[in-house]
Image (cartoon, coloured by chain):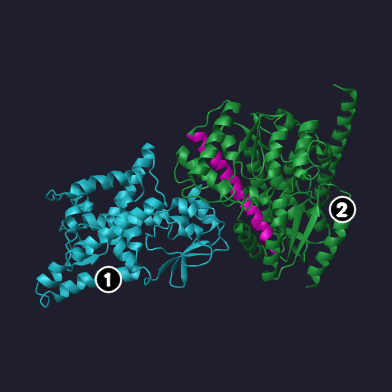
Amino acid sequence: MDIRFQKRKDRFDRNFKRVSNKTLNQLKDTNLDYHMTYFYDCLESMFVLQSLEYLSNKPIVGTFCAMVPDELILACGGQPVKLCGGNYIAQIAGDEKSPRDSCPVVKSTVGCFDMKLMPIYEQCKLAIVPTSCDGKKKMAELISKYVPTSLLHIPAIKDGDNFDEMTGMYFGLIDEIEKKTGTKLTRSSLKKAINLTTRINKEVYMLNEFKKMTPPVISGTHAMAVVNAYQYSDREIYFKEIKALNKHLKSKVKNEEYLRKASCRILMTGSPMVFPNLKMPIILEDLGAIVVADETCAGDRMLADPINCRENTIEAMVKGIAMKSILPCSCPTFAYNEDRIFRLKQMISEYQVDGIVYNVLRGCLPYDFEVRNVEKLSETLGIPVIRVETDYNTEDMEQIKIRLEAFVEMLRMK
Amino acid sequence: MNRFSSKIRWMIMIGSFILLVFGGRFITPSVKMALPVFNCPYNLDTVVEGSCLYITEWSDYLIGSNILSDLGRLFLIYGSTFIAILALGKLWCGFVCPFGFIQEVLYKIRAFFGLKVITFNQKHKSYFKVVKYGLLAIFIIGLGFCEICPVRFVIPPLNGVATNLSIGIVASVIVVTMALFSERFFCRICPMGAFIGLFHKITPWRIKKDCTSCTACGICYEVCPMDIKEIYTERENEDVTDSDCIFCNKCIDNCPEKEALSLAVGPVKVYKASRKNYYNNNL
């Protein structure tokens, strides 16, 4: 290998670990609970130690977005891993390979592939890219140099009479995954996979119940870390750990060990926030607010909706998976996205939200389009909203802090 | 919260099936009443008769016979039918109807053998609507619906009563095979259901939807045996009761969102959807 390239890679590697470690330490500083260690360790082994020990030994299949169902990969004997990048250093690495105005998620992912910053990007057997936005679509072309990719077509509108068209796409996906993992999908394996994810879904739902309490028992940042760890873990072990965490939180409720009485309950929405880019929630919670609700696709939305299968045949189960992946998804990539406004409205009342923070990653157009709708909603409900445009860099931390401080202060005065 | 969940519904269905079809073997009723379900009165040993015969052959009972002498008996039969329709509406279909029960059992048998389901779309549904109201016309005017009634060759033989052959046996074979492959196939075209459906606006039973809570995940539409799409697409009105709805409550059983769907009697919500209920039914 070229020595200059090697040196450059070393530098990127070093900084990549530093940035990931920083976020991890910020998390650990505020909550060093024994039951959280699994989730921290999981993220640490993946991002800092660069090992695959927290994954199962099955072939790794990479996914993007919330529309690629993990169940199909699990049922085909694969290990699903989220490939969306969230690291600033990877964003710099990807800068020259992708257009200037593309979003940091795309840049960071391309950077990870190009510089081989994490072992999962090298080990990955197949990357499934949904055509959710233009960035993702063209990113598929960029990363196809490094890894075999498979496109999953996402319709622009959620319509159809009996969703057969949609189900067909997912059947096509099964074939592609089977080829890479070498294991055939069977009725029982699919049933098992659905059962496992439904159980995890139930635990995540319970975790959210703890955030709904006033005052909550777990802060939004840590809940986000827990949900983020899901992407990089062996699902069976993850289920056991999150179950233990919920049990622990339940005992905390019993002993009335609530978090400090926060005056502002924040709903975090907008562009995806992938670990280690937890900049915004960390700043908000530093300022004394609490991120109670999270409507971002790397966070709660990923695991918000359960699957329903009409019966135990492969057809019915795949249809259930396809419906779960597309219909309740509130991604702004869909042309008419009333559903998201309804969901936000419901979340605002359920979590007793005081203010909305709308995060827009620079270059993330679909989310920027919907700011207007959310502003309109906030006007009717009388709940303030702030739009913060940023990317993964840490230089604008202070400016964001000042803006958010004013916002939180205003919420307190209300 | 599990009061109306599927287990209770099955228990009521099994109970009413035994009582309505075989009940006459244990109990000899002194007063005859009729309920708005398809239970063939060709079999005279039943405790409670299905009122289908009395509705379709109303001319025989109301005009042909001496009304004054039979007043008490007729009042009981027609009165109980109408009171039952007004009080419970289409709950009769989902909870009591013995033929509905037979169809659901057939559908379960199909699932056991893993046979493929036949699905219908909204276009087919509009064709079924034409058939349904056509049958309803035949049923109400009294053009001898019993001759083509598929139930006549299912329930009386179950009870050990022979009926004379008619063209209905063809309809019966078609309906029974279709019911194997499509959940509650006959309910889509059932004239009795259509008849009760005429009164659905004045019965107190309602399916209500909280449009804010709904995430439009489509589960309710997917599990609906009647393929009612409005329940999934509705985004404004609270009342989503459809005249086709048979109140099987499957949508509420499987709805994962908090109170997004609920069964209500007037203003009181008796059975609400919740995530907990969803997990009970799906894990």
Element under disc 1: helix
Residue A381 pos. (x, y %): 67, 70
Residue positioned most to the bottom: B68
From which residue to which does the magenta span run?
A187-214
Residue A299 pos. (x, y %): 69, 49
Query: Which residue is located at x 20 percent, y 57 percent?
Result: B40
- Per the image, is A161 magenta? no
* Residue occupied by mark 1: B82
Q: Name the disc covering residue A138, or none.
A: none
Q: Nearer the viewer, residue A37 or B140?
A: B140
- Per the image, is A210 magenta? yes
How would you classify the magenta stretch by its main secondary structure?
Answer: helix
In the rendered view of the protein, which quadrant contains the N terminus of chain A?
A: top right
Q: Does mark 2 fall on the same chain as mark 1?
A: no
Q: Colour of chain B?
A: cyan
Query: Which residue is located at x 62 percent, y 36 percent?
Result: A151
* Residue A149 in view of the camera: yes
Circle 1 packing at 10 Å, graded few (<14), some (14-19), many (20+), is some
Q: Chain of mark 2?
A: A
In the image, what residue type sits under mark 2? Met
Q: Name the disc covering residue A397, or none.
A: 2
Q: Which chain is green?
A: A
Height in image: A133 above or below A208?
A: above
